Amino acid sequence: MSDILTVADLTLGFRTEAGPARVLDRVRLSVRPGEIVGLVGESGCGKTTLARAILGTLPAEATQVGGGRIELAGSDMLGPGGGRGVRGRAVTFIPQDPFASFNPLFRIGTQIMDLMRWNSPRRDPAVRTGWYSPARRRADRAAAIAMLEAVQLPQPARILRKYPHELSGGQRQRVMIAMALLPEPRLVIADEPTTALDVTVQAQILGLLRRLAVDRGVAVLFTTHDLGAAWEICDRVVVMYAGQTAEIAPREGFFAAPRHPYTHLLLRSLPEEGRDPVGIPGSVPSPLRPPPGCRFHPRCPRASQVCTEQAPPLLGEGHLTACHHPVGGALGDTLDG
Amino acid sequence: MLRRFARDRAAMLGAVLIGLLVLAAVFAPWLAPHPEDVWQFHTPRRLLPPGPGGLFGTDRMGGDVFSRILFGARITLSLSVIAVGSAVLIGVPVGLVAGYFRGWFSDLLMRFAEIFLAVPQIVLAIAIAQTLGPSIQNVILALSITYWPFWARLVYAETRSLRNEVFIESAVALGASPLRVMVLHVLPNIASPIIVRTSIGMGATILTAATLGFLGLGAPPPTPEWGRMIAESREYLPDAWWYALAPGMAIFLTVLGFNLLGDGLRDILDPRTRRSAGQGGGGGGGGGGGDE
Amino acid sequence: MVWLNIVLNRLVWLVPTLLGLLAIVFVLSRVVPIDPARLAAGDNASPEQVAAVRHSLGFDRPLPEQFLRYVAAVARGDFGTSLFTQQPIADDLAARLPATLELTLVAIVLAAAIGIPLGVVCGLRRNSWLDHVLRVVTVSGLAVASFWFAMQLQFLFSMKLAWLPLSGQIEGFPPEHVTGLMIVDALLTGDTEALRSAVRHIVLPAITLALPAAATVVRFTRNGVIGVISSPSVAYQTAMGYPRRLIVWKYVLRMAVTATVTQLGLIFGILLAGAVVVETVFDWPGIGAYAVRSILQSDYNAIMGFTLWAGAIFVAVNLLVDLLQAAIDPRGAR
């Protein structure tokens, strides 16, 4: 089955006052239709930048693409006019901060119906104008109400008349999920969708997201720094460290037998019954002066001379690792999953 | 910090304009081609257009407009510095005290200040200046009385928001006297907005002073006050078009200088209202590496 | 409830503010070296006549008593009589209010119509050449002395080009009185002659008055747009494929205008202060010119009446701004 999203060797950075920041370094990633992929990494590892790059919403004037490509539902997102007609249709977005992501001055209903006016699946993509037929408006509204019900919001018609500040954080994120699913996309990018929420609400929202996505066959790319959350809902996990892809593995294999030393340490840093969490010494390097070779080598207990000179290629079948000295030995030949 | 300032071309322009004003004021007697024209009449030479005789032409008394502009800079500069200085000296302590202490007295002080803000400043200034009689001293007095509440209100708000900061509370807990806390701890931390406000306040004060002069409330003639010069020129329009041009431009460039400087200082000193750094963009968004 | 709170909050402070204002002006007017009784009696009056006038005007009583009498009279709507027009000051002011209102309204519409779109464009194209040019223009607009700018306009458009009248509000017969606003009255009565004249007369004063206000609106709108355009809500809408023009001209504009409205009180203050000078230069028969003339003629009853009016209008405008803000910002007044 062909991938819905392919990120191939993406290298990307920003011009800053302090010089170029090399935020992403030959990142590789793919999402298959209907699959839920967790993109895991610490804050500052480039997850959000990658999510925005896929959506094509990075600030054009400051962004420098060093190479690679992003292909989403057959469209080249880095090409001229990249993403237009794809954003909001084939791919939608659930933001990190449901508090700030609504415009506070407009009712929820206005904001949903403006989305539907332009991106509803019932809209004829050939029509370039904003014409909104009453019949389609009625159908879109009914769909919106049904979707709000599906995300378990009581009295959806009343929600539509409310202003964002009249909803709780959890309610707002449910609306965001509904809006992400309404255009019937093939992929939803959820950028740390639960970090801004109470712990008690987080699990509900994650469960809801997974169930709705699986029911509808929608693929999800889900960024998180929370391995627990990844374990809850993902089919496959991609680990990033300082802008490089470290490991890609199916969920079971990932948690049972991590191969990259970073992943290994990351899992050991989780609090678990019977042992204290172990932190990883050192800190994430600045993208202004990333270490040469494997960016993890200054903190890696297994690092050797070669790690400081060459960035390791991403190798393996199904379970891929970018490491010169992977944990657990034997590696397959070169091939991506 | 200085480098940032030097890169801000607008702020530099402001500094240069103010520098020129100060130079003109200080060296007026040497720079002016006809320093005696400030007080003497040369009726045969009256209302001459700009030419070799005088850069900006001559006025209704035959005075060289250029020379009078230079001497006018002295009036404008000294008047605005003294008026704004007094307004700051009244407003800052009032705002500090009202902001630092809580209670009816603080409320009363600020209510009193707000009374002055309830009518257009120009009206209040005209009323006071007229009541006191036309002289430079009275213009200064009128402007200080009119403008002090601006600093009081600013300092009050800043002090209030600072009052609950940990470092202020710990200074109080360590037994520092209120005066000591206000002067040594609060004041240095609110200096930036005061400086910015003062630069912009200079511009506003100069405009108001010129308006008073225009309405005939400033120093009596033949004082070379810019606003008064413009008022005098009115009856000679449209023939003596140059007459009003030079003093008007002088006011404009001076006020522009203080406003540009204030804007530039705000960018440097007051990060909350920063007009976001210029070209090259990206700024925080890119520098952080993305994961906001 | 929010509305009631806002109104009460403002009204509670209206009376003390106006009383304080009155006290300040009153003290000023009574400590002056000029004897108002002599002024009222005229130059040729004998000492006895002056004394009689002084007594009849109450100037011979103690200051606090004079003040209380004045406040009591004001409370009854009696501002006293102008020493010069010999008319009740309330009537003088009421007769001149429509002219000021008309000028100010035209200026505010002009400032908004020019300032908001320019501010939006500058905010969207930050650091473009247009933004730089407009930054210079707006900073300049706030640095120009309005009386001088007015004179230059008069010089160019009235004297040299003779396109527009030099001063005044209308030429020939004014339209039939309906609202007191010349342009509106001319429109209502279909008086095209008067309409033409009224419009031609208002152009220059309105431009002069609108210049600093428009400059302020541009700056606030620009900064508002810059703040909003980089906000998470715009990032979200962009990622969700909302069309750019919808984001800008519906969502961002509304946010920026809301931010500008919070500054309307300030902008109105600029206009009110400007009106005083602009009306004087253009001989516009409004309360601003009346105030300047009263002040220059030491007509203290008129000065106090005007000050009180200006204070009341200012408080009313701020109240209006609070209400407007509560109306357009669903989060409620902050």
Image (spheres, coloured by chain):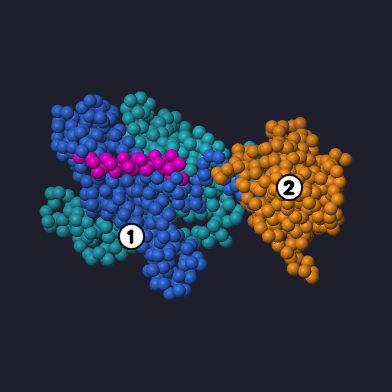
Chain colours: A orange, B blue, C cyan
Residue B154, horizontal then vertical, whole percent: 42, 57
Q: Which residue is located at x 45 percent, y 74 percent?
A: B174
Q: What residue type is labelled 2?
A: Val
Residue beneath label 1, please?
B90
Q: Say whether residue C286 is left or right of residue B7.
A: left
Q: Say whether residue B3 is left or right of residue C241.
A: left
Q: In this view, does A202 lie above or below C187?
A: below
Residue C304, horizontal then vertical, whole percent: 31, 54
Q: Is residue C304 above or below residue A61?
A: below
Classed neighbour count for the residue bearing mark 1: other residues with Cα under 10 Å, few (<14), some (14–19), many (≥20): some
Query: Mark 2, chain letter?
Result: A
| Residue C298 within the segment the image draws in magenta | no
Residue beneath label 2, please?
A306
Residue range of the region highlighted in magenta in the rendering: B4-29
**Residue furthest front as drawn:** A305
Q: For the residue labelled by badge 1, is the local secondary structure a helix, a strand or a loop?
A: helix
Cβ–Cβ under 8 Å for marks 1 and 2: no
